[in-house]
Image (tube, helix red, strand yellow):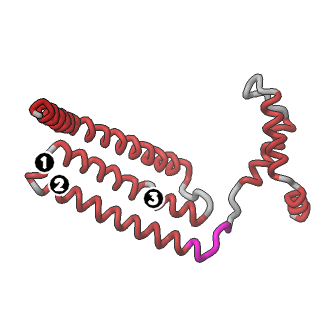
Amino acid sequence: MYIMMAFLEEFDHYSSLDKLMSIYQATNRTIFNWTDSRIVEWEKFAELAKYEPESQKPTVKALLIVAYSVIIIMSLFGNMLVCHVVLKNKRMHSATSLFIVNLAVSDIMITLLNTPFTLVRFVNSTWVFGKAMCHISRFVQYCSLHVSTLTLTAIALDSCPFVLLLFFSHFEHHQVAAQLE
């Protein structure tokens, strides 16, 4: 343990990274051109880059828990309210309203399947839920991101004809007014 502490004190993070980068760039004929000494150096660097088990103070952890809890509760309440209002009101059954429900469902997915696990990861400074949940959480995160982006694109495309109609009618109105003067 003492030897490792002495090594860490003498180990210069930046010069080691520069050394690794220069070695990698100098012999970058293939990405599999690693010798045993380079692998050992990389493992030492990766070990130093890991989080410490207790990297956060208790007050920071408490603030994280409170902030994430408020965000989770507000997100669930707001998005469920949006879904409820749109689905219960017959007047709200339009393409744009259904796109907004789609955004709300995407946000609910993130809130339930990603945010709590992210909070635990930040508080514990490590992932404790296993490999399968790591993949599921990441998959949900990316799916929700794509659903949100594509839904906003669909909303824009859905409203594009109306925007163009207003633009051209406004443009024609000014053209006619200019000709009358």
Residue 93: which disc? Answer: 1
Circle 2 SS class: helix
Mark 2 highlights which residue? 86
Mark 3 highlights which residue? 115
Nearer to us: label 1 or label 3: 1
Circle 3 SS class: helix
Could you tell me if the residues under marks 1 and 2 are in contact, i.e. CB atoms within 8 Å?
A: yes
At 31% from the left edge and 42% from the top edge, which residue is drawn? 152
Nearer the observer, 175 or 61? 175
Mark 3: give few (<14), some (14-19) or many (20+) Cα within 10 Å.
some
| Magenta segment includes 120 | no
| Magenta segment includes 60 | yes
Nearer to us: label 2 or label 3: 2
**Tag 3: residue type?**
Thr
Q: Which residues are magenta?
A: 54-61
Kindly report the distance in space between the C-alpha atoms of the residues bearing marks 2 and 3. Answer: 25 Å
- Counting from the top left corner in percent of width and height, residue 175 is at 16, 31
Q: Is residue 118 left or right of residue 12?
A: left
At 46% from the left edge and 69% from the top edge, which residue is drawn? 67
Q: Earlier in the sequence, mark 1 or mark 2?
A: 2
Q: Earlier in the sequence, mark 1 or mark 3?
A: 1
Total marks placed: 3
**Tag 2: residue type?**
Val
**Tag 1: residue type?**
His
Q: Is residue 128 left or right of residue 23?
A: left
